Image (cartoon, rainbow, N blue to C red):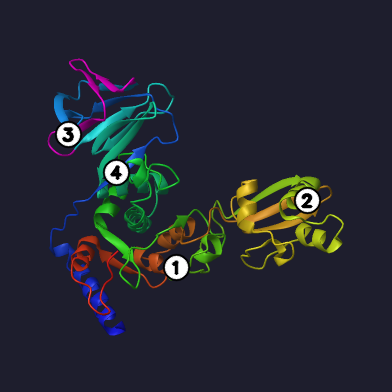
Amino acid sequence: MPILRSLFVLMLLHSLSVLGQQDITVDRTMRIGLHRERTVKQVIVMPVKGNWWVVVDGERKGEVTSTDGLRIATVPGGLSARSLTLNLTAKRSIELVPRNGHGFFRLRLPDTKQAERTYPGSLRVVPAGGNLLLVNSVPLEAYTAGVVQAEAGKEHHQEYYKLQAVTCRTYALTNQRKHQPEGFELCDGVHCQVYHGRNRNDSIQMAVDATHSLVLVDADIRLIHATFHSNCGGETVNSEDLWGRSQTYLRATVDTFCIAAPHATWHKSMGRGEWIGYLQRKYGLRGDDSAQLHAVLNYEPQCRDLYLSNTWPLVPLKEVREDLKLKSTYFSVRTEGEKVVLEGRGFGHGVGLCQEGAMRMAKAGRSYTDILHHYYTSVHLVDLTTLDFFRDEPAGPGGPRAR
């Protein structure tokens, strides 16, 4: 079985060598829930160019142009939609779809100070408990470019944009059922991946095009959970140490590239009584036990720990980070008179790819494939269409497993 699996992997990897010699398209669309952190009662939608169909409850009822817009709002029993020439009502949904199959639209929330955003693809608006559910149906590659722009920012090395494109694309496909019961696949916030619409950065677009349809898979040819974070503080963490589930590709690794980056260190001060009181209330720390007090007031980890001071009572650092809104679980504790100072390293959960470490690796001349293999153990970079082809094949002994 190991031999068959190895041959299968080699066949997949061989297919990548001819990517530049053939026209491969990935006909995939992601459904993204927009502005889920807000209460939306009405929106104004304006095509960027061309004519767009207005589809009401599944039927075409008119069209709008780039010189017009559609104001959609909740009304008793459904939705209303108005433009310069249209006055429509719907019970279930209103959709705006470009007539030529692709395009961009501008979206404005008139009841908020949220800046107008431009999105690729189409928009579906559904009444949801007196509010509007906004779902952007966007081609996978356009979505990937938008996520990279929001997550990575500007003025980075091309190799960094390439690796971020691969991780964002892989993460999207691995988690595409995350919000399925709510009527879409992924949200546009940090709960999934940050997505603010159309990418306008030429360097990012070049990186997305250069890695078109490439994703990361594990040894069993399954899409990986391509998690990433801002800064690991010099050491990433095993997945089971944070989430309780071991993944063969999410292994702890040393990272010397991020330790001088902007988010490498942090600190937080609080009253000595506040710190001890928190530990007493939640974990039963004994205030009359000098050994316990010394352990939680003088803590200097030599590497990443799971528990504060590794002593009784057990205090999970993951919970401390959440409760006190700390930037990471990697910190020391010392006292200064009546104050307690937490001196921390890193920013984020610490699992998978360290963004600031990867940025500096790219600047140092490392290729995006080398950087990906540094943070993700024993993974393969494969073409998505090739992956689909082999998944359609019957799985024989030792062959690929269906998802």
Q: Which residue is mark 4?
A: 31
Q: CA distance from mark 4 to mark 2?
A: 47 Å
Q: CA distance from mark 2 to mark 1?
A: 36 Å
Residue 41, x across and y down, in percent: 38, 24
- Residue for point 52% across, 60% down: 243
Indicate the secondary structure of the residue bearing disc 3: strand
Badge 4 or badge 3: first in the primary sequence: 4
| Rendered position, 400 above or below 285 | below
Question: Which image quadrant: the C terminus?
Answer: bottom left
Screen quadrant of the N terminus = bottom left
Task: State the residue position of label 2.
Answer: 276
Residue 54 point in image, percent of width and height: 18, 27
Q: Which residue is mark 1?
A: 247
What's drawn in magenta, residue-wise?
Answer: 75-102
Q: Earlier in the sequence, mark 3 or mark 2?
A: 3
Q: Amino acid at mark 2?
A: Ile
The answer to whether residue 259 of the structure is visible from this angle is: yes
Give the residue pinned by disc 3: 98
Residue flagged by tag 4: what amino acid is it?
Arg
Neighbour class for label 4 at 10 Å: few (<14), some, many (≥20)?
many
